Image (cartoon, rainbow, N blue to C red):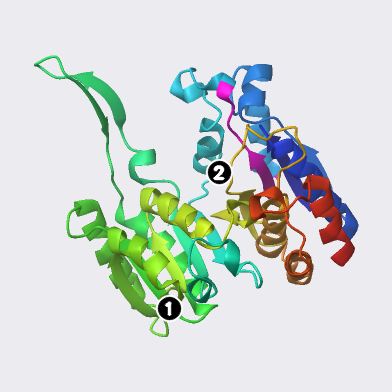
Amino acid sequence: MKILLLAGDGIGAEIMVEARRVLDALALPGLTLTEGDVGGSAYKKHGHPLPPETLAKARVADAVLFGAVGDPDCDNLERHLRPEQAILGLRSELGLFANLRPATMFPGLEGMSGLRPEIARQIDVLIVRELNGDVYFGEKGMRTLEDGRRQGYDIMSYAEDEVRRIAHVAFRAAHGRTGRLCSVDKANVLETSQLWRDVVIETHAEYPDVELTHMYVDNAAMQLVKAPGQFDVVVTGNLFGDILSDQASMCVGSIGLLASASLGERQTDYGTFGLYEPIHGSAPDIAGTGKANPMAMILSLAMLLRHSLGLEAEAARIEAAVAKALEDGVRGGDLGGTAGTTEVADAVLARL
């Protein structure tokens, strides 16, 4: 089993150390770990945020564990050289089109949510976000109109096969949960969304046991804070999914608790190839201070073990250890506590 570790920028290196400690504690036989440069640190070393050698390592790995990218020193670079292009490049080059972002309220943390406790404890949603299309990858640019005004443009588009493959992922996920899927779009305004809705409905015929509903994205954002218990699995496009998944993270109390998986179609000897990362970013303001919460990174490792290596028991052990640490009152600064990065990881390891 081959795992590529890409720590990246900011707090990425600190939380990667703790995830690796958890991985070492499992003592998995036949496991090979390699490392690579990515993001702003890669640009400073190699002149590009996604060096060819890093991409080559990713292509032969069974899974990638990713820290975070983002470096204020690189904010003024041309767009294609900025750290964030590394993750976009990996998703595109490796065919990672399906992003899974679970958001679940851990018992005892209801008071950390911006929602009332009785509403917050309802949250147990999986957001399935399409990753390779939409305005993020469409034609874009800056131009000057005839009257001299500057205009920026980004083209939103989806082909039906791109919608169909993410719909299959979402229907299968719903089948494995409570059997409810909500497709989020803006079909009353956008032709792209009308195609999205049409294809999702067509695909539903193959999953008669799954209940399918549709919701406009503005209403979905409202319902996520008003009555989150109505959602089981949500499937949506790249732009809407980016926004809704971050909203869901704050509903459960902290962005420092949410893991994610980006999956493609390539199968390995053990499962589905994927890239796994916490959703909180590089947090340069606290990098190097030992304050970062490593729990989202550790939970990302659990998702890696489950989806790419087929190690369900080990994944469940990690998730149970994190939940027990939280139940026992171990809190990082993001949750109003004083536990540092290493202290939080120590608590998880003790319960593992």
Which of 269 and 95 lies nearest the eye of the viewer? 95
Secondary structure beneath disc 1?
A: strand
Per the rendering, the mark at residue 200 is none
Q: Is residue 352 visible?
A: no
Which of 250 and 217 lies nearest the eye of the viewer? 250
Secondary structure beneath disc 2?
A: loop
Q: In the displayed structure, would residue 247 be above or below residue 58?
A: below
Per the rendering, the mark at residue 180 is 1
Separation of residues labelled 1 and 2 (CA atoms): 29 Å
Range shown magenta: 61-72
Q: Quadrant of the C terminus?
A: bottom right
Is residue 70 found inside the magenta-colored segment of the image?
yes
> Residue extending furthest top?
148
Residue 216: horizontal and vertical position, in percent? 27, 63
Q: Is residue 237 visible?
A: yes
Per the rendering, the mark at residue 94 is 2
Residue 42: horizontal and vertical position, in percent? 66, 24
Is 268 displayed left or right of 94 in the figure?
right
Is residue 309 found inside the magenta-colored segment of the image?
no
> Residue drawn at (75%, 47%), measured in percent from left and top?
3
Q: Nearer the viewer, mark 1 or mark 2?
A: 1
Badge 2 density bin: few <14, some 14–19, many ≥20, Cα 10 Å: some
Q: Amino acid at mark 2?
A: Leu
Q: In the displayed structure, would residue 171 be above or below residue 342?
A: below
